[in-house]
Amino acid sequence: MQTPLSSIVSRFKNKKVAVWGDLILDQYVFTSAGRVSREAPVLVTEFEKNEYLLGGAGNVVMNLHALGAQPLPVGFIGKDAPGEILLGLLHEQGITTRHLVTADAFQTPLKSRILAGGDNTKKQQILRIDTLPPVPAGERARLKLVRALFAALAESDLLVLSDYLAQAVIPSVFQAVKKKFPKKPCVADSRSHLLDFPGVTLATPNEPEIKSLFPGNPFLADDDFLLAGGELLRRLDARGVVLKRGHRGMLVFGNGEKPVALDIYGTSQIVDVTGAGDTVLAVLGLGLASGASLLDSARLANIAGGIVVMHEGAYPVGRRELQNALR
Protein backbone atom coordinates (compact mmCIF):
# COMPACT_ATOMS: atom_id res chain seq x y z
CA MET A 1 0.00 0.00 0.00
CA GLN A 2 1.38 3.39 -0.99
CA THR A 3 1.90 6.10 1.59
CA PRO A 4 0.77 9.65 0.69
CA LEU A 5 4.38 10.65 0.04
CA SER A 6 4.99 7.54 -2.04
CA SER A 7 2.01 8.35 -4.23
CA ILE A 8 3.56 11.76 -4.94
CA VAL A 9 6.79 10.08 -6.07
CA SER A 10 4.76 7.86 -8.41
CA ARG A 11 3.59 11.01 -10.19
CA PHE A 12 7.18 12.06 -10.94
CA LYS A 13 7.30 9.70 -13.91
CA ASN A 14 7.51 11.38 -17.31
CA LYS A 15 7.21 14.92 -15.94
CA LYS A 16 8.96 17.19 -18.44
CA VAL A 17 11.35 19.61 -16.76
CA ALA A 18 13.33 22.41 -18.38
CA VAL A 19 16.67 22.70 -16.56
CA TRP A 20 18.17 26.12 -17.29
CA GLY A 21 21.66 26.53 -15.93
CA ASP A 22 25.40 26.02 -16.00
CA LEU A 23 26.35 22.53 -17.09
CA ILE A 24 29.74 21.45 -15.74
CA LEU A 25 31.86 18.41 -16.57
CA ASP A 26 33.26 16.74 -13.45
CA GLN A 27 36.49 14.82 -14.07
CA TYR A 28 37.86 12.36 -11.53
CA VAL A 29 41.52 11.46 -12.07
CA PHE A 30 42.41 8.31 -10.13
CA THR A 31 46.07 7.82 -9.30
CA SER A 32 48.18 5.57 -7.08
CA ALA A 33 50.41 7.24 -4.52
CA GLY A 34 54.06 6.47 -5.02
CA ARG A 35 56.80 8.65 -3.61
CA VAL A 36 57.97 12.16 -2.87
CA SER A 37 59.49 13.99 -5.81
CA ARG A 38 63.21 14.78 -5.88
CA GLU A 39 62.42 18.08 -7.60
CA ALA A 40 60.17 19.51 -4.89
CA PRO A 41 58.48 18.38 -1.63
CA VAL A 42 55.40 17.12 -3.48
CA LEU A 43 53.76 13.74 -3.91
CA VAL A 44 54.38 11.83 -7.14
CA THR A 45 51.39 9.73 -8.22
CA GLU A 46 50.88 7.38 -11.15
CA PHE A 47 47.83 7.76 -13.37
CA GLU A 48 45.27 4.94 -13.28
CA LYS A 49 42.08 6.13 -14.96
CA ASN A 50 39.71 9.00 -15.70
CA GLU A 51 36.02 9.06 -14.85
CA TYR A 52 33.55 11.72 -15.97
CA LEU A 53 30.23 12.80 -14.46
CA LEU A 54 27.79 15.63 -15.08
CA GLY A 55 28.11 18.46 -12.58
CA GLY A 56 26.35 21.74 -11.87
CA ALA A 57 23.02 21.88 -13.66
CA GLY A 58 24.02 18.58 -15.25
CA ASN A 59 23.75 16.87 -11.88
CA VAL A 60 20.22 18.26 -11.49
CA VAL A 61 19.47 16.74 -14.90
CA MET A 62 20.78 13.35 -13.79
CA ASN A 63 18.71 13.47 -10.59
CA LEU A 64 15.55 14.26 -12.53
CA HIS A 65 16.30 11.44 -14.95
CA ALA A 66 16.88 8.94 -12.12
CA LEU A 67 13.55 9.98 -10.57
CA GLY A 68 11.69 9.09 -13.77
CA ALA A 69 11.24 12.59 -15.17
CA GLN A 70 12.23 13.80 -18.64
CA PRO A 71 14.77 16.60 -18.22
CA LEU A 72 15.32 19.14 -20.99
CA PRO A 73 18.70 20.77 -20.30
CA VAL A 74 19.15 24.35 -21.52
CA GLY A 75 22.60 25.92 -21.39
CA PHE A 76 25.92 26.54 -23.12
CA ILE A 77 28.65 24.12 -24.15
CA GLY A 78 31.90 24.85 -25.91
CA LYS A 79 33.37 23.40 -29.09
CA ASP A 80 35.94 21.49 -27.09
CA ALA A 81 36.75 18.04 -25.72
CA PRO A 82 34.91 18.56 -22.39
CA GLY A 83 31.84 19.64 -24.36
CA GLU A 84 31.95 16.48 -26.47
CA ILE A 85 32.28 14.32 -23.35
CA LEU A 86 29.39 16.15 -21.69
CA LEU A 87 27.17 15.59 -24.72
CA GLY A 88 28.20 11.94 -24.79
CA LEU A 89 27.18 11.45 -21.16
CA LEU A 90 23.73 12.89 -21.89
CA HIS A 91 23.31 10.76 -25.01
CA GLU A 92 24.25 7.62 -23.07
CA GLN A 93 21.29 8.24 -20.77
CA GLY A 94 18.90 9.02 -23.61
CA ILE A 95 18.59 12.67 -22.49
CA THR A 96 17.86 15.19 -25.21
CA THR A 97 20.51 17.78 -26.06
CA ARG A 98 18.47 19.74 -28.62
CA HIS A 99 18.12 22.75 -26.29
CA LEU A 100 21.86 23.09 -25.62
CA VAL A 101 23.69 25.88 -27.44
CA THR A 102 27.20 25.29 -28.73
CA ALA A 103 28.86 28.68 -28.41
CA ASP A 104 31.97 29.89 -30.26
CA ALA A 105 34.82 30.96 -27.95
CA PHE A 106 32.99 29.48 -24.95
CA GLN A 107 34.87 27.03 -22.74
CA THR A 108 32.91 24.15 -21.27
CA PRO A 109 33.36 24.38 -17.46
CA LEU A 110 35.56 21.54 -16.20
CA LYS A 111 36.29 20.60 -12.60
CA SER A 112 39.12 18.10 -12.31
CA ARG A 113 39.52 16.25 -9.02
CA ILE A 114 42.80 14.43 -8.46
CA LEU A 115 42.48 11.41 -6.16
CA ALA A 116 45.36 9.36 -4.79
CA GLY A 117 45.78 6.33 -2.58
CA GLY A 118 47.60 3.05 -2.13
CA ASP A 119 46.56 -0.28 -3.61
CA ASN A 120 44.54 -1.27 -0.56
CA THR A 121 43.44 2.12 0.71
CA LYS A 122 40.60 4.47 -0.14
CA LYS A 123 41.38 7.10 -2.75
CA GLN A 124 41.41 10.61 -1.28
CA GLN A 125 41.01 13.89 -3.14
CA ILE A 126 44.29 15.77 -2.96
CA LEU A 127 43.68 18.56 -5.45
CA ARG A 128 40.92 20.15 -7.52
CA ILE A 129 41.59 22.16 -10.66
CA ASP A 130 38.77 24.31 -12.07
CA THR A 131 38.87 25.32 -15.73
CA LEU A 132 36.16 27.94 -16.10
CA PRO A 133 35.07 30.08 -19.07
CA PRO A 134 37.32 33.17 -19.14
CA VAL A 135 34.70 35.12 -21.10
CA PRO A 136 30.91 34.76 -21.31
CA ALA A 137 29.15 33.45 -24.38
CA GLY A 138 28.60 36.02 -27.13
CA GLU A 139 25.39 37.88 -27.88
CA ARG A 140 24.43 35.60 -30.77
CA ALA A 141 24.74 32.53 -28.53
CA ARG A 142 22.66 34.24 -25.84
CA LEU A 143 19.85 34.92 -28.31
CA LYS A 144 19.95 31.26 -29.36
CA LEU A 145 19.76 30.26 -25.71
CA VAL A 146 16.64 32.38 -25.16
CA ARG A 147 14.94 30.71 -28.11
CA ALA A 148 16.00 27.28 -26.84
CA LEU A 149 14.70 28.09 -23.36
CA PHE A 150 11.31 29.22 -24.63
CA ALA A 151 11.02 26.10 -26.80
CA ALA A 152 11.84 23.86 -23.84
CA LEU A 153 9.39 25.65 -21.57
CA ALA A 154 6.58 25.33 -24.11
CA GLU A 155 6.62 21.54 -23.56
CA SER A 156 7.59 21.45 -19.86
CA ASP A 157 5.68 21.07 -16.61
CA LEU A 158 8.34 22.87 -14.59
CA LEU A 159 11.37 25.15 -14.83
CA VAL A 160 14.43 24.41 -12.69
CA LEU A 161 16.93 27.26 -12.49
CA SER A 162 20.46 26.12 -11.56
CA ASP A 163 22.78 29.13 -11.46
CA TYR A 164 26.34 28.08 -10.62
CA LEU A 165 28.54 30.42 -12.63
CA ALA A 166 26.27 33.32 -13.66
CA GLN A 167 26.83 32.39 -17.31
CA ALA A 168 23.68 30.78 -18.71
CA VAL A 169 21.05 32.16 -16.32
CA ILE A 170 20.29 35.83 -17.01
CA PRO A 171 17.91 37.77 -14.70
CA SER A 172 16.39 39.86 -17.51
CA VAL A 173 15.61 36.70 -19.47
CA PHE A 174 13.98 35.20 -16.39
CA GLN A 175 11.62 38.17 -16.19
CA ALA A 176 10.73 37.61 -19.86
CA VAL A 177 10.04 33.97 -19.00
CA LYS A 178 7.69 35.02 -16.19
CA LYS A 179 5.73 37.23 -18.58
CA LYS A 180 5.41 34.57 -21.28
CA PHE A 181 4.78 31.64 -18.90
CA PRO A 182 3.20 33.26 -15.83
CA LYS A 183 1.74 30.01 -14.43
CA LYS A 184 4.82 27.85 -15.00
CA PRO A 185 6.25 26.79 -11.60
CA CYS A 186 9.93 27.60 -11.14
CA VAL A 187 12.34 26.39 -8.47
CA ALA A 188 15.66 28.18 -8.21
CA ASP A 189 19.12 27.58 -6.80
CA SER A 190 21.58 30.44 -7.31
CA ARG A 191 25.00 30.49 -5.71
CA SER A 192 25.19 34.25 -5.29
CA HIS A 193 22.43 35.98 -7.29
CA LEU A 194 19.19 34.67 -5.81
CA LEU A 195 17.73 38.13 -5.18
CA ASP A 196 18.00 38.83 -8.92
CA PHE A 197 15.14 36.38 -9.57
CA PRO A 198 12.01 37.79 -7.90
CA GLY A 199 8.89 35.87 -8.77
CA VAL A 200 10.34 32.36 -8.47
CA THR A 201 7.94 29.81 -7.04
CA LEU A 202 10.50 28.33 -4.67
CA ALA A 203 14.09 29.13 -3.68
CA THR A 204 16.57 26.72 -2.06
CA PRO A 205 19.49 28.59 -0.45
CA ASN A 206 21.95 26.96 1.93
CA GLU A 207 23.37 28.59 5.05
CA PRO A 208 26.43 30.25 3.46
CA GLU A 209 24.26 31.64 0.67
CA ILE A 210 21.63 33.16 2.94
CA LYS A 211 24.35 34.64 5.13
CA SER A 212 25.84 36.38 2.10
CA LEU A 213 22.39 37.72 1.14
CA PHE A 214 21.90 39.33 4.55
CA PRO A 215 25.34 40.48 5.77
CA GLY A 216 23.79 42.66 8.48
CA ASN A 217 22.25 39.65 10.23
CA PRO A 218 24.61 38.19 12.88
CA PHE A 219 23.24 34.62 12.47
CA LEU A 220 24.08 33.73 16.06
CA ALA A 221 20.85 31.86 16.84
CA ASP A 222 18.04 29.97 15.13
CA ASP A 223 15.85 33.06 15.28
CA ASP A 224 18.32 34.83 12.99
CA PHE A 225 17.81 32.17 10.32
CA LEU A 226 14.04 32.35 10.78
CA LEU A 227 14.16 36.11 10.27
CA ALA A 228 16.35 35.84 7.16
CA GLY A 229 14.25 33.09 5.61
CA GLY A 230 11.06 35.08 6.10
CA GLU A 231 12.67 38.21 4.66
CA LEU A 232 13.93 36.28 1.61
CA LEU A 233 10.44 34.87 1.06
CA ARG A 234 9.02 38.39 1.12
CA ARG A 235 11.65 39.94 -1.14
CA LEU A 236 11.32 37.19 -3.74
CA ASP A 237 7.53 37.22 -3.52
CA ALA A 238 7.82 33.44 -3.66
CA ARG A 239 5.48 30.66 -2.68
CA GLY A 240 8.19 29.12 -0.55
CA VAL A 241 11.80 29.10 0.60
CA VAL A 242 13.57 25.95 1.73
CA LEU A 243 16.71 26.74 3.71
CA LYS A 244 19.19 23.85 3.61
CA ARG A 245 21.08 23.63 6.91
CA GLY A 246 23.31 20.58 6.38
CA HIS A 247 23.31 18.27 9.40
CA ARG A 248 20.64 20.52 11.01
CA GLY A 249 18.10 19.56 8.35
CA MET A 250 15.86 22.16 6.71
CA LEU A 251 13.70 25.16 7.46
CA VAL A 252 10.60 25.42 5.29
CA PHE A 253 9.01 28.85 4.80
CA GLY A 254 5.62 28.96 3.11
CA ASN A 255 3.82 32.12 2.10
CA GLY A 256 1.35 32.90 4.90
CA GLU A 257 2.43 29.85 6.90
CA LYS A 258 4.46 29.29 10.03
CA PRO A 259 8.04 28.09 9.33
CA VAL A 260 8.57 24.34 9.82
CA ALA A 261 11.86 22.70 10.82
CA LEU A 262 12.67 19.27 9.37
CA ASP A 263 15.31 17.18 11.09
CA ILE A 264 17.92 15.47 8.93
CA TYR A 265 16.84 12.11 7.51
CA GLY A 266 18.96 9.16 8.60
CA THR A 267 22.22 9.36 10.51
CA SER A 268 24.27 12.49 11.12
CA GLN A 269 27.43 10.53 10.17
CA ILE A 270 27.55 12.06 6.70
CA VAL A 271 29.80 10.50 4.07
CA ASP A 272 29.78 13.21 1.37
CA VAL A 273 27.50 16.21 0.78
CA THR A 274 28.47 16.53 -2.90
CA GLY A 275 25.39 16.98 -5.06
CA ALA A 276 22.86 16.84 -2.22
CA GLY A 277 21.62 20.35 -2.97
CA ASP A 278 20.94 19.37 -6.58
CA THR A 279 18.92 16.38 -5.40
CA VAL A 280 16.88 18.58 -3.07
CA LEU A 281 16.22 21.02 -5.91
CA ALA A 282 15.08 18.24 -8.26
CA VAL A 283 12.76 16.57 -5.75
CA LEU A 284 11.22 19.84 -4.57
CA GLY A 285 10.48 20.83 -8.14
CA LEU A 286 8.97 17.48 -9.07
CA GLY A 287 6.87 17.54 -5.90
CA LEU A 288 5.36 20.91 -6.77
CA ALA A 289 4.87 19.91 -10.42
CA SER A 290 3.05 16.78 -9.22
CA GLY A 291 0.56 18.81 -7.19
CA ALA A 292 2.09 18.18 -3.76
CA SER A 293 2.11 20.77 -1.01
CA LEU A 294 5.28 22.71 -0.24
CA LEU A 295 5.73 20.85 3.05
CA ASP A 296 5.25 17.38 1.54
CA SER A 297 7.64 18.28 -1.28
CA ALA A 298 10.19 19.42 1.32
CA ARG A 299 9.74 16.20 3.32
CA LEU A 300 10.47 14.16 0.20
CA ALA A 301 13.47 16.33 -0.67
CA ASN A 302 14.80 15.99 2.87
CA ILE A 303 14.65 12.19 2.64
CA ALA A 304 16.25 12.15 -0.80
CA GLY A 305 19.05 14.45 0.40
CA GLY A 306 19.60 12.18 3.39
CA ILE A 307 20.10 9.23 1.05
CA VAL A 308 22.57 11.14 -1.14
CA VAL A 309 24.91 12.17 1.70
CA MET A 310 25.37 8.51 2.63
CA HIS A 311 27.14 7.93 -0.70
CA GLU A 312 30.40 9.20 -2.12
CA GLY A 313 30.28 11.75 -4.90
CA ALA A 314 27.24 13.09 -6.73
CA TYR A 315 24.79 10.21 -6.29
CA PRO A 316 21.43 10.53 -8.10
CA VAL A 317 18.59 8.93 -6.12
CA GLY A 318 16.35 6.63 -8.12
CA ARG A 319 12.56 6.79 -7.96
CA ARG A 320 12.24 3.24 -6.63
CA GLU A 321 14.98 3.87 -4.05
CA LEU A 322 13.13 6.92 -2.76
CA GLN A 323 9.86 5.01 -2.59
CA ASN A 324 11.54 2.19 -0.67
CA ALA A 325 12.80 4.70 1.89
CA LEU A 326 9.19 5.77 2.49
CA ARG A 327 7.99 2.33 3.52
Image (spheres, helix red, strand yellow):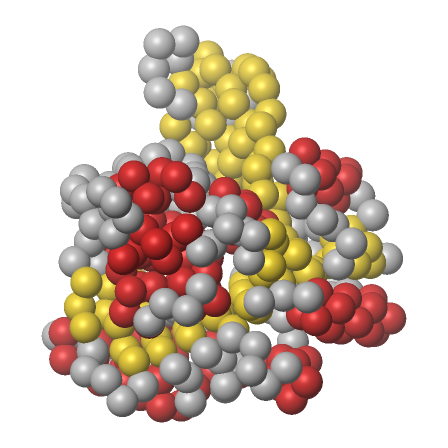
| Residue at screen point 60% across, 33% down | 52
In the image, residue 71 above or below residue 186: above
Using the image as rendered, state which of residue 12 and residue 303 is in the foreground: 12
Q: Quadrant of residue 147?
A: bottom right
Q: Is residue 156 above or below residue 235?
A: above
Quarter assignment of residue 233: bottom left
Q: Is residue 196 above or below residue 110?
A: below
Which quadrant is the C terminus positioned in? Answer: top left
Q: Position of residue 271 (x, y in %)?
A: 28, 37
| In the depicted structure, whether residue 28 falls above or below residue 228 | above
33 left or right of 15 in image: left
Relative to the observer, which residue lies in front, 31 or 300? Answer: 300
Quadrant the N terminus occupies: top left
Image location (x, y in percent) of residue 162: 54, 63
Say left or right for 38 vs 240. right
Measuring from the top left, give residue 2's x and y in whole percent.
Answer: 28, 48
